[in-house]
Amino acid sequence: MNDKDSTIELENINEFYKFLQGEIPKSIKMTKKSRPNLTKEQAFSVIWFLQEHMQVLPERFEYCNGCQRMFDTHDEGYSVYRGRLYGDECCNGGRK
Ligand SMILES: [Zn+2]
């Protein structure tokens, strides 16, 4: 997806990220059995698939392997350290 065409914000990504871990938005009714129950790393794998393979989510949202949060690379810097991506602001690019 071309990031310029997207109205998807970090807030939306975080809502989906939490949804995949079983935290369902109040506006949605879903039985416990139906709720996803992924780890943070697995949840990011789903987001990554939708970004890179399906191209339905903007690629600018990244996952910090240090503190396992999603962030917007248009707002924050990042570094790849030993093959894994880290936020510069939260985890000093993996160097701390
Ligand atoms: Zn971090």
Image (cartoon, rainbow, N blue to C red):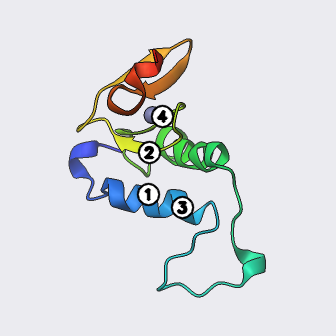
Task: Give the residue at x 57% y 45%.
Answer: 44
The residue pinned by badge 1 equals 14
- Badge 2 element: strand
The residue pinned by badge 3 equals 18
- Badge 4 element: loop
Residue 25 % position (x, y): 49, 77
Q: Give the alpha-carbon distance from disc 1 to disc 2, as whole Å.
A: 7 Å
Task: Give the residue at x 30% y 56%.
Answer: 9
Between 46 and 22, the one lying in front of the other is 22
**How many labels sit on residues?**
4
Residue type (three-letter) at the residue carrying disc 4: Cys
Q: Are marks 1 and 3 in contact (CB under 8 Å)?
A: yes
The residue carrying pointer 4 sits among few (fewer than 14), some (14 to 19) or many (20 or more) residues within 10 Å by Cα, namely many
Label whose residue precedes the other's in the sequence (1 or 2)? 1
Residue 22 % position (x, y): 64, 67
Q: Are marks 3 and 2 in contact (CB under 8 Å)?
A: no
From this view, report whether residue 79 is shown above or below residue 8. Answer: above
Label whose residue precedes the other's in the sequence (3 or 4)? 3
Residue type (three-letter) at the residue carrying disc 1: Asn
Label whose residue precedes the other's in the sequence (3 or 2)? 3
